[in-house]
Image: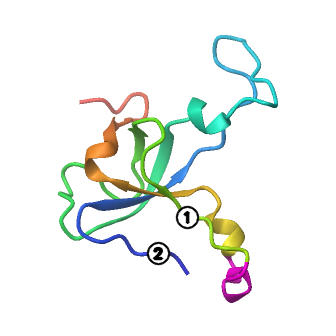
Amino acid sequence: MQPRPFKDRVLVRQEPTKEKLDSGLYLPESADHALYNNFATVLAVGSTVNADDVKVGDRILFKRAPGTALVPDARDAALYADSAEWVDLLMLRIEDIIGVVEPEGEQA
């Protein structure tokens, strides 16, 4: 089961945070890793989201710390067999998306 976004919302799965940054620096275990990763893959879009802007499967870049994290309440976890799958899900507004990251070699 996966939540369905309404209107201008976009459901995304946040990419795992790297332990080592591209610059070569390692993130300490105490760091808030959510602040260092703002890339995600689009899983579903709401009814008013323009398909020319973003579509399912796109890799996007979004503003830091936006949206709503979808982590079911521990009391309700038994209702969802796939609740562990919700851990990296975010519900964003379309205006929180900065852009679509095109795969290398496919830029227009």
Q: Quadrant of the C terminus?
A: top left
User: Which picture quadrant has residue 63?
Assistant: top left
Residue drawn at x 63%, y 72% as measured from the top left: 72
Range shown magenta: 75-82
Which disc number belongs to residue 7?
none
Image coordinates for residue 13, horizontal then vertical, percent: 53, 55
Q: Which element is circle 1 on?
A: loop
Image coordinates for residue 29, horizontal then vertical, percent: 82, 31
Closer to us: 76 or 7: 76
The main secondary structure of the magenta stretch is: loop
User: Which picture quadrant has residue 103?
Assistant: top left
Query: What colour scheme was applied to this rendering of the protein?
Result: rainbow
Residue drawn at x 47%, y 75% as measured from the top left: 3
Q: Vertically, is 95 above or below 83?
A: above
- The residue to which callout 1 is attached is 70
Q: Is residue 37 left or right of residue 94?
A: right
User: Label 1 near label 2: C-beta < 8 Å?
Assistant: yes
Residue drawn at x 22%, y 48% as measured from the top left: 53
Image coordinates for residue 71, horizontal then vertical, percent: 62, 65
Q: Quadrant of the N terminus?
A: bottom right
Q: Vertically, is 100 above or below 77?
A: above
- The residue to which callout 2 is attached is 3
User: Label 2 sits on what residue type?
Assistant: Pro
Question: Which residue of the protein is positioned furthest toward the right in this rendering?
Answer: 29
Give the number of the mark in front: 2 or 1.
1
Magenta stretch encompasses residue 49 = no
Q: Which element is circle 2 on?
A: loop
